[in-house]
Image (cartoon, rainbow, N blue to C red):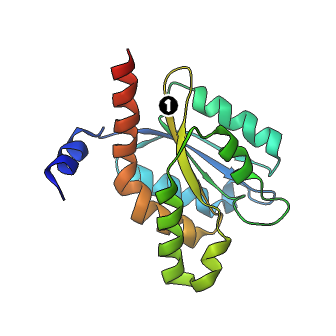
């Protein structure tokens, strides 16, 4: 790791506040395995889950909830699970893509590469996406994961848990510089 990268990691917040949103027509709290994995891994990493919700795959309702979560000052980042596939009911990608100001293309690319190593060509069906969303209180991070428990665990362990504090640090740093 370069000296610059090491310094950024050291400056990253030890604790971030994450909202978890599961998008599903069938999941209930008892069967929300993807959401449970996100919560478990974020808490194990020392972060706070400030909000958790399950919403049906209905684009206007998803957008309403996401805008509310992103406007909440107790939320640094939002992680969604579900609704990123290619079926007619999968609308999370469309909603989030309209909200994102700066897309982190590397997130989706890396996720699909890692997923390909596990499941092969079916990885191309994932529309996992991440980026920053401008809000009145500054930019917030959002990441959208597939609904599969294995996919959620892969994205969390390999990408988000190690890097989300650095992403939040970068967004906060620029917020402070703008003041």
- Which residue, given by chain and number where applicable, does mark 1 sit on? 139
The answer to which image quadrant residue 62 occupies is: top right
Q: Quadrant of the N terminus?
A: bottom left
Which corner quadrant holds the C terminus? top left
Name the residue at 49% across, 74% down.
113
Disc 1 packing (10 Å; few <14; some 14–19; many ≥20): many
Which residue, as the protein is rendered here, is positioned at the far bottom? 120
* Relative to 82, residue 112 above or below: below
Q: Splitting the image into 4 quarters, where does residue 150 fall?
A: bottom right
Task: Tell me which residue sits at (43%, 51%) in the image.
Answer: 42
Q: Is residue 53 visible?
A: yes
Whole-percent x, y for residue 155 in the image:
49, 63
Give the percent coordinates (x, y) of residue 41: 43, 57
In the image, is residue 161 above or below residue 65?
Answer: below
Question: Do we see residue 142 in this rendering?
Answer: no
Q: Residue furthest top?
A: 179
Whether 122 is drawn above or below 99: the answer is below
Q: How many marks?
A: 1
Extreme residue in the right direction: 88
Q: Is residue 25 or residue 123 the one in the foreground? A: 123
- Residue 65: give x, y in percent of width and height: 71, 36
Which residue corresponds to the image point at 34% horizontal and 39% vertical from the top-left? 15
Circle 1 — which element?
loop
Q: Residue at x 50, y 28 (%)?
A: 74
Is residue 168 shown left or right of residue 78? Answer: left
Left-right relation of 88 to 153: right
Residue 118, how many percent across, how many down? 51, 82
């Amino acid at each position: 790791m370069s000296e610059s990268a090491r310094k950024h990691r050291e400056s990253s917040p030890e604790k971030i506040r994450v909202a978890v949103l599961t998008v599903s027509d069938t999941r209930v709290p008892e069967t929300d395995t993807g959401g449970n994995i996100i919560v478990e891994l974020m808490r194990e990493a020392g972060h706070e889950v400030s909000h958790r919700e399950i919403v049906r795959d209905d684009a206007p309702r998803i957008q309403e909830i996401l805008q509310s979560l992103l406007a909440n000052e107790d939320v640094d980042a939002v992680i969604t699970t579900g609704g990123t596939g290619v079926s007619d009911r999968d609308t999370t990608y469309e909603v989030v893509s309209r909200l994102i100001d700066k897309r982190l293309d590397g997130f989706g690319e890396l996720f699909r590469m890692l997923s390909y190593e596990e499941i092969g060509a079916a990885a191309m069906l994932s529309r996992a996406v991440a980026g920053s969303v401008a809000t009145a209180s500054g930019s917030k991070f959002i990441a959208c994961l597939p609904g599969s428990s294995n996919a959620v665990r892969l994205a969390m362990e390999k990408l988000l848990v190690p890097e989300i504090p650095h992403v939040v640090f970068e967004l906060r740093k620029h917020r402070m510089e703008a003041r």
